[in-house]
Image (tube, rainbow, N blue to C red):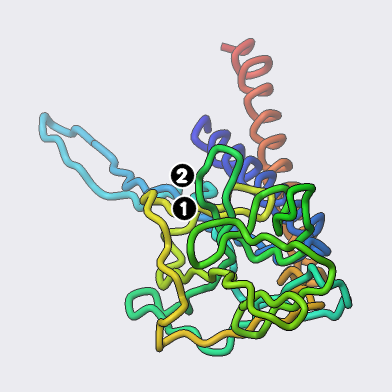
């Protein structure tokens, strides 16, 4: 009976975490470049039950069957599909539009592209949020993090009349400034870790290679546009309702076990 307690409680915890993940997706439905998470829910290993009987000094072991020991949320997996592209007419907004990205042979999943930004501690992180601003130093930034050029230095905008070409070249007054927005490529999305605030890092700590010059990758940058999140709000609400129903079902099972234990202790125990 105690095993049933643990199994039902594991189901409740899993669905609670699932609901929290879905709530975060819904809350970021309007966040530019946000990549929604999916839950990888796994079952604990099954246990094989056996019955031991001793008769006339002979012990026999017979199999009863297997029993499941509950589920758990193994990890959150970001979904790197392209979000919808929306016009904003803001010159500092830049959408990264994938045209051709190779599929990883082992995972059968497409790779993904990112803007490279530098955080306050000097680390390079990656984002799809192209809602940029220009800080007091004239740097093109995403949430305060400078956007990097191919040379590995921040993009500097000196005037108001600037243009970003589809290839990422920065022009001012129609002249090339010598700066090109760097786009990084990851072929195996399993190597990416979501750090929050629209930033990703690599699990192995290495920097992603530049997509510029990679003949297998094709993309364009669209100035005055933004990539919206790829959250499917209707599906997220449906999954949220399913998670709540599953939580309630496990809760009722837990309450039934609790009543059975109460009766065993307070009634059957008293008779004995």
| Residue in the image at 72% along x and 47% along y | 144
Q: Quadrant of residue 229?
A: bottom right
State the separation of the CA atoms marked 2 and 1. 7 Å
Q: Residue at the left extreme?
A: 57
Q: Nearer the viewer, residue 73 or 63?
A: 73
On screen, residue 261 above or below 238: above
Q: Quadrant of residue 210?
A: bottom left
On screen, residue 76 above or below 269: below
| Residue in the image at 46% along x and 84% along y | 217
Q: Nearer the viewer, residue 220 or 151?
A: 151
Give the image location of residue 52, x and y in percent: 24, 37
Give the image location of residue 195, x and y in percent: 58, 47
Give the SS element for disc 2: loop
Instruction: Say whether residue 237 is visible.
Output: no
Tell me if label 2 and label 1 are in contact, CB under 8 Å: yes
Residue 202 relative to residue 227: left or right: left
Q: Which residue is mark 1?
A: 43
Give the image location of residue 119, x and y in percent: 59, 45
Q: Nearer the viewer, residue 262 or 90?
A: 90
Give the class, few, some or many, for how many residues have Cα within 10 Å of label 2's Cα (few <14, many ≥20): some
On screen, residue 249 above or below 263: below
| Residue in the image at 80% along x and 63% along y | 29
Q: Nearer the viewer, residue 85 or 91?
A: 91
| Residue in the image at 65% along x and 85% along y | 166
Q: Quadrant of residue 127?
A: bottom right
Q: Which mark is residue 266?
A: none
Label total for image: 2
**In the rendered structure, which disc, 2 or 1, sits on the residue that comes first in sequence?**
1
On screen, residue 26 above or below 251: below
Q: Which residue is mark 2?
A: 69
Mark 2 or 1, closer to the camera: 1
């Amino acid at each position: 009976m105690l095993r049933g307690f643990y199994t039902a409680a594991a189901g409740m915890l899993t669905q609670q975490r699932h609901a929290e993940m879905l709530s975060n997706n819904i809350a970021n439905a309007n966040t530019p470049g946000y990549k929604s998470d999916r839950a990888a829910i796994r079952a604990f290993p099954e246990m094989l039950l056996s019955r031991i009987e001793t008769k006339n000094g002979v012990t026999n072991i017979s199999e009863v069957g297997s029993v499941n020991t509950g589920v758990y949320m193994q990890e959150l997996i970001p979904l790197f599909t392209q979000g919808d592209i929306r016009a904003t007419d803001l010159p500092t907004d830049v959408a990264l539009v994938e045209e051709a990205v190779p599929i990883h042979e082992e995972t059968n999943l497409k790779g993904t592209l990112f803007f490279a930004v530098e955080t306050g501690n000097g680390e390079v992180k990656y984002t799809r949020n192209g809602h940029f601003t220009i800080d007091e130093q004239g740097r093109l930034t995403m949430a305060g993090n400078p956007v990097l050029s191919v040379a590995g230095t921040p993009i500097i905008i000196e005037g108001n009349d600037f243009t970003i070409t589809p290839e990422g070249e920065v022009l001012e007054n129609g002249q090339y400034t010598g700066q090109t927005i760097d786009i990084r490529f990851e072929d195996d999305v399993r190597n990416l870790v979501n750090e929050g605030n629209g930033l990703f890092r690599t699990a192995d700590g290495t920097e992603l290679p530049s997509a510029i010059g990679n003949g297998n990758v094709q993309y364009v940058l669209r100035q005055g546009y933004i990539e919206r999140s790829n959250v499917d709000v209707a599906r997220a609400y449906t999954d949220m309702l399913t998670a709540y129903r599953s939580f309630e079902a496990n809760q009722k099972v837990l309450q039934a076990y609790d009543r059975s234990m109460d009766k065993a202790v307070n009634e059957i125990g008293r008779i004995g």
